[in-house]
Amino acid sequence: MSVTTLLSVEARAQDFPTKPVTLIVPWPAGGSTDITLRAIAEVASKHLGQPIVIENKAGGNGTVGPATMAASAKPDGYTIAQIPITVFRLPMMQQTTWDADKDFTYIVHLTGYTFGVTASAEGPFKTWKDVVDYAKANPGKVTYASPGAGGSLHIGMEQVAAKDGIKLTMVPFKGGAETNAAVLGQHTMLQADSTGWKPLVDAGKLRLLMLWTAERSPNYPNVPTLKELGYPFVFDSPFGLAGPKGMDPKVVKVLHDAFKKAIDDPSIKATLAKYDMVANYKNTEDYVKFVKEVTDSERKVVDSLGLGKKTN
């Protein structure tokens, strides 16, 4: 059964018998999130029996797209969005237009990222220790490109810096294409991002200094993890899909089932593996529970770093 079938009365009324589902990707085109979600959407569309079109709506460290959907989209199943962890974290740090508990209908949890820190291959840093030593000798001089304030990469770098007693200056960008360009052109000294840097690392243009995974990546067996470098952290910023609040549970199930089949597809597993991403499936009920768990844990981290929004 497709979304079109479930919404056949509305679809006929609007004369859109094959109306596509729009999947908002809140990052620029060409990054690891965009590439993998396009692949997932293509397979999911076959199970839905209707097209899924990607709309890139970048900004706000991945929150502009979901916020726009929550504020303006109908809860009919035709508009859904990727939900990065910043949707839960940013309301703790500043005033936002959305409430993560009330303004979304959570559909399915999909996967998470492999994060890493890179430097230009032409730059001075060959190891993470080089960065720490330089930062201690030159307080405030180390800059890094990231997708923006409040994201997992920003929060992670702050935690790493706090443990070493150093200052790292974040320079925000909209997504991987921009952070790649920043570090490649040495406009920033480092880049902290997901695996959109992979082609440049593989080409020898960027040097991968460390990964934030629990274990070493089979793609980069010589690159140490945070834990191996002495930091008690693993960051993978898991994400799923949601629609606006008030969606029909039957429509949620149809969308859930299509995307579940997609991430089980061997071609999608291969695409995820290419970017060091592993399927992390949660059904709708478990995803809702997970949102609460993530929100609680993120609040503790934000408060510990002194980044919580100020109240009068």
Image (spheres, rainbow, N blue to C red):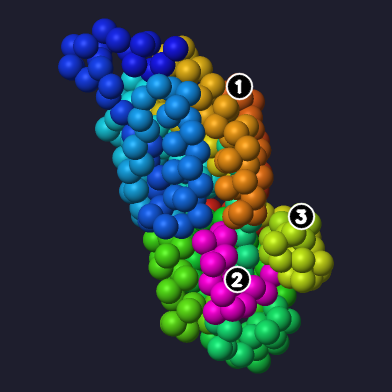
> Is residue 199 on the magenta stretch?
yes
Instruction: Establish if 235 lies above or below 166.
Output: above
> Looking at the figure, which quarter contains the N terminus?
top left
- Determine the residue positioned at 34% across, 34% down: 22
**Alpha carbons under labels 3 and 1: distance apart:** 26 Å
Position of residue 125 in the picture relative to residue 66 (left or right): right
- Residue 52, quarter of picture: top left
Instruction: State which mark lies toward you, 2 or 1.
Output: 2
Mark 2 vs 1, N-terminal side: 2
Q: Amino acid type of disc 3?
A: Ala
Q: Amino acid type of disc 2?
A: Asp
Please, what secondary structure does the residue beneath circle 1 have? helix
Q: Which residue is mark 3?
A: 214
- Residue 260, quarter of picture: top right
Q: Are marks 3 and 1 in contact (CB under 8 Å)?
A: no
Instruction: Establish if 39 lies above or below 156.
Output: above
Relative to the observer, which residue lies in front, 136 or 206? 206
Q: Which residue is mark 1?
A: 285
Q: Amino acid type of disc 1?
A: Glu
**Alpha carbons under labels 2 and 1: distance apart:** 39 Å
**Alpha carbons under labels 2 and 3: distance apart:** 21 Å
> Is residue 244 on the magenta stretch?
no
Mark 3 vs 1, N-terminal side: 3
Disc 2 crowd rating (10 Å Cα; few below 14, some 14-19, many 20+) is few
Position of residue 302 in the picture relative to residue 22 (left or right): right
Relative to the observer, which residue lies in front, 285 or 32? 32
- Residue span colored magenta: 192-210
